[in-house]
Image (cartoon, grey):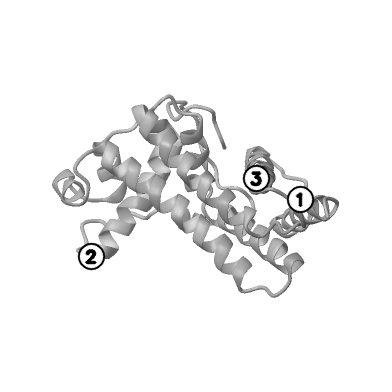
Amino acid sequence: MTNSSPDARHTVKFHPSGSPSDGGQPTAGNRLPAAERREQLLAVGRQVFAETGFHGSSMSAVAERAGVTKPVLYQHFDNKRALYGAILSQVGESLEQAVFSAAMAASTGREQVFAGVDAAVQFVAQNPYGFQILLAAKNSTDDEWRGLAHRWRQSMATQIAALIVVEGMLPAHQEALAYGVVGMVESMMGSWLDAENPALDAASLSADLAALAWFGLRGLS
């Protein structure tokens, strides 16, 4: 499901452990409150951009898929770049919030790692289109998209670094390790989504990822 360029054209399928909640449904002209309409358009946009990439998509395609007219779509987003940027920001912020809300609700360091990783896995399983777009942006040649993805990764790494408590370790060392954790999660989740028949379900992948992160960090203390 993942790709290195936001312009690659391919068919996107929901992961076996995923959910169709990531792709918005058409409303056949039914009126929705503004906030609900915006969320629906973002969800439809995630699906369209994941299927055809930024340059392969159009506002007409999003409007048609959403079951609205183009003027309705333009009431919420000035242009295609605005819609794509809003999607990237929403996905990154939602993933970050899910991970750290779960981690901060845990008591011990071990519980924080396992809870945070599990939240990340569950988010990706429920938002395969959004996660694909986030990964594509990281490798995009577009400075704006790459910058949005970088800011998300930087924020995640900064917060993870604060959880790495090893006596005498310099902040720069903590940050480097934190980026390693972020990269490991990204890589494993991308590979998992790419698999037609993944060997692990979401729960097993979460347990394995958390164990790798936790026992790897514990080996440094």
Which corner quadrant holds the N terminus?
top right
The outermost residue toward the right is: 219
Secondary structure state at the residue bearing disc 1: loop
Crowding at mark 1 (Cα within 10 Å: few <14, some 14-19, many 20+): few
Whole-angstrom CA distance, mark 3 to mark 2, is 34 Å
Say if residue 46 shows up in the picture: yes
Residue 137 at what x, y percent from top left?
Answer: 46, 35
Residue 43 at what x, y percent from top left?
Answer: 38, 52
Q: Give whichever of 149, 53 is nearer the camera.
A: 149
Q: Give whichever of 140, 54 is nearer the camera.
A: 140
Secondary structure state at the residue bearing disc 3: helix
Say whether disc 3 or disc 2 marks the residue closer to the N-terminus: 2
Q: Which residue is mark 3?
A: 189
Please, is residue 165 above or below residue 178 in the view?
below
Residue 113 at what x, y percent from top left?
Answer: 70, 61
Q: What amino acid type should be assigned to the residue bearing mark 2?
A: Leu
Crowding at mark 3 (Cα within 10 Å: few <14, some 14-19, many 20+): many
Q: What amino acid type should be assigned to the residue bearing mark 3?
A: Met
- Number of marks in the image? 3
Please, is residue 122 above or below residue 10 in the view?
below
Query: Mark number for residue 32?
Result: 2
